[in-house]
Image (cartoon, rainbow, N blue to C red):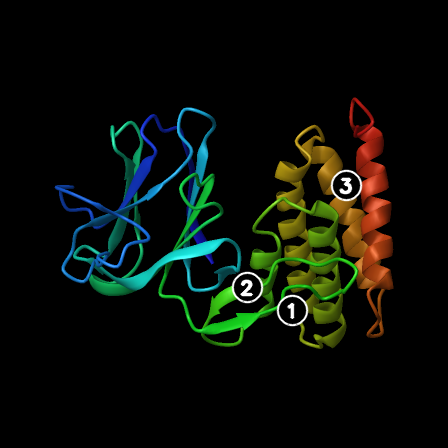
Amino acid sequence: MRIAAIHMLVNNPHVIFGSTDVVEYFIEVPSPEASLVKGGHLATRTRAQVAPVLIQVWRGPHPDLGTVVFDGSAYLPGGSLFVLDVERLTTFSRKCGAPGSHRLTVRVDEMGEASRVDLVLDGGEKRMELSRIDSYPLPAVAGVSAPLAPPDILNLILADFDAPKARLVNAMDLVIHEWVADASPRAAVRRSARVRQIIEWMRWAFPLVGLSELKRVGGVIDREVAGVTDCVNGEVAVRIVESSLKGLLSVCPDGGS
């Protein structure tokens, strides 16, 4: 799951990460000498003086994207991962677990000029597909160590904003199938919570649409999902999403163009 994210503007291309100890030196990855077993810091080369660099911290499951430039042990004496640029214009730390050694996997979208750096702690060895409908593909997930519960899968589906329709369709299909299979007294509450999670994602995906309109769309989606009584293929999810998107685009000042 994603536990932190930040956009960094960097003058020097190196982004440094490791323990919260004082940074005395760093080793650029990929490198056969790179090791955080005894503490210390690594760095990856990113695009500089061009545009922000997206740094994301994940625990376990994460998008199976980019190139792995490091996969080893990170010693975090305080249990926190520290990230900064060379000039220390931007620094942040994230508590990631108990003090000690953690598996750290580093992925970049482009070696030597990364615009996206994923720092993954304690990832597992398994891989799983997020796509539920073949015609709406999504990137797979790596770093899985145990079966994921529906809310965790939904979080991963809604972890980005590329291919927004595909993410909406797959998220809707997950919610529909969970609702149909759930006979517990809390099924309706759970369904509405999942729909609210989708609406919160849509607040960033469609910034020109006001919250009141999104809540109205959420109410419509919730009622439509509540009316589904049988396990279905993805056609119902596609229909609900297309209807919702048509309504949202109609309220955009520029018509969604």
Discs 3, 2 touching: Cβ within 8 Å: no
Q: Quadrant of the C terminus?
A: top right
Residue 153 placement, left or right of 11: right
- Label located before the other in sequence (2 or 1): 2
Q: Nearer the viewer, mark 1 or mark 3?
A: 3
Residue type at mark 1: give it.
Arg
On residue 141, which mark appears? Answer: 2
Above or below: residue 166 compared with residue 182: above
Cα separation between marks 1 and 3: 22 Å
Discs 2, 1 touching: Cβ within 8 Å: no
- Label located before the other in sequence (1 or 3): 1
Above or below: residue 88 compared with residue 56: above
Above or below: residue 252 compared with residue 30: above
Q: Residue tagged by mark 3?
A: 216
At 82% from the left edge and 45% from the top edge, which residue is drawn?
A: 244
Q: Classify mark 3: residues with Cα within 10 Å, few (<14), some (14-19) or many (20+).
A: few
At 29% from the left edge and 61% from the top edge, which residue is drawn?
A: 97
Residue 129 placement, left or right of 170: left
On residue 186, which mark appears? Answer: 1
- Residue 227 spot, x, y in % from top left: 85, 63
- Label 2 sits on a secondary structure element that is strand
Q: Classify mark 1: residues with Cα within 10 Å, few (<14), some (14-19) or many (20+).
A: few
Q: Classify mark 2: residues with Cα within 10 Å, few (<14), some (14-19) or many (20+).
A: many
- Residue 152 spot, x, y in % from top left: 54, 63
At 47% from the left edge and 39% from the top edge, which residue is drawn?
A: 115
To which quarter of the image does residue 245 belong?
top right
To which quarter of the image does residue 157 belong?
bottom right
- Label located before the other in sequence (3 or 2): 2
- Residue 120 spot, x, y in % from top left: 39, 57
